[in-house]
Structures are given as C-alpha cells and as structure tokens.
Image: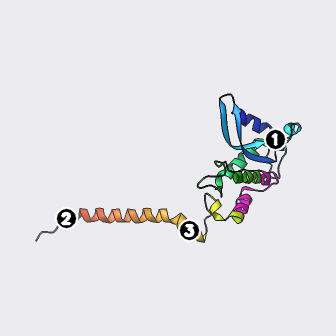
Amino acid sequence: MLWLKRTLVALGCVAVASVATLTTTQGTQSAGFCIVPQAQAAEQKVEQTKQGLTGRELYDEAIAVSKLLRDPSSANNTLFESETALSGELKALIYQKLREGATRGEILDYMAERYGEAVRYQPDFNATTFLLWAAPWIAVVVGAFVFWRSMRRKKKPAVRS
C-alpha cells in the first residue's frame, strides 16, 4: 500500500497517468492505475476541478471510469486491468478530462464516439441494445412457462377406458 500513499500525495498536480511497477516493502507489485507526479515542488499543491473533485476523489473517479471501459487493444480487459501502452494513454486522457471538469457520462460518450460502442463494458440501453438487455429476462419467462406447462401435464390423472 506504499504505492497508494505515494500516489495520493501527488494527485493534485498530476498530468500523466500510466501503468507502473512500484516497489513496496513486500516486494515489487504492478499497479493497475498509477499516477506519476511531474514535479517535486507540486506535491504540496491540491487542485480542485470544476466538479469539485480533489485528491482522492479525483483518483477514485478516474479508477471508476477506467473500470467501465474496455481496452480496445486487448481482449476482454478493462482499462483498469490492462497494461498496454494504449491503455496507459487512455488512463491519462481520462484523468486529464476529469481535471478539466468532464463528467463520467461525457467521458464515456467521448470514448464511445472515438472507439465505438464496443469500448463500453456495459452498453447503453437503447433500441439497438434492447434485445441484449431483454434476452435474459425473456429466457427466464419462457423457461418458467415451459416448466409450469410440464408440471401441469404430470398432475392430470390418466384416463382409463
């Protein structure tokens, strides 16, 4: 957790977000979303965004947004989990946009516009994704109906002639 303390100290002045390997007392660990400070003197400075986010809140929001987006360059990884060069650039972009005052929705829309809807881990509910969201519920209702019909047939006594 030493890397987290170092990261939080530098949050107010950070302009670069990247994947990095940091050494802790337990050994070397890979950090999924690590903030790298630009200058030593800026460590004391805490900047407030238009949304009112500072320090830890800004860091937490950047992580939350990175968990909602898929890394376009690797299969089935969120930006938070991925360690590719592109994911590092996108994490930096997310952090920069948050510092500029962009909301979570604006960032998600920007990424979807730039990389397509497939970049979202949870697609929006709209006409094109209706079946995607409705299919599990339809399957449950159909399954319950089939089960009910089969149980009802078993309860009818056989008519002997």
Residue that extends furthest to the left in the rendered view of this protein:
161
State whether residue 104 is above or below residue 31.
below
Where does label 1 land, which residue?
A: 37
Residue 25, image x and y in percent? Answer: 68, 28
Q: Nearer the viewer, mark 3 or mark 1?
A: 1
CA separation in Å, label 3 and label 1 = 43 Å
Which amino acid lies under the numbered mark 1 shown in the image of this protein? Pro
Q: Residues within 10 Å of mark 2 (few under 14, many from 20)?
A: few
Q: Nearer the viewer, mark 1 or mark 2?
A: 1
Q: Residues within 10 Å of mark 1 (few under 14, many from 20)?
A: many
Residue 18 point in image, percent of width and height: 74, 46
CB within 8 Å, label 3 to label 1:
no
Reading the image, the residue beneath label 2 is 157
Q: Nearer the viewer, mark 3 or mark 2?
A: 3
Query: Is disc 1 in contact with disc 2, using a CB cutoff of under 8 Å?
Result: no
Q: Secondary structure at mark 2?
A: loop
Name the image quarter holding residue 117: bottom right
Q: Quadrant of the C terminus?
A: bottom left
- Against 133, is 94 above or below? above
Magenta span dominant secondary structure: helix
Amino acid carrying mark 3 in the image: Phe
Tag 2 or tag 3, which sits nearer the N-term? 3
| Placement of the N terminus among the 4 image quadrants | top right
Say which element carries label 1. Answer: loop
Query: What residue is disc 3 on?
Result: 130
Residues drawn in magenta = 95-111
The earlier-in-sequence mark between 3 and 1 is 1
Image quarter of residue 2: top right
The image position of residue 70, as x and y in percent, is: 64, 56
Q: Is residue 152 magenta?
A: no
Is the residue marked by circle 3 packed among few (<14), some (14-19), or many (20+) residues within 10 Å?
Answer: few
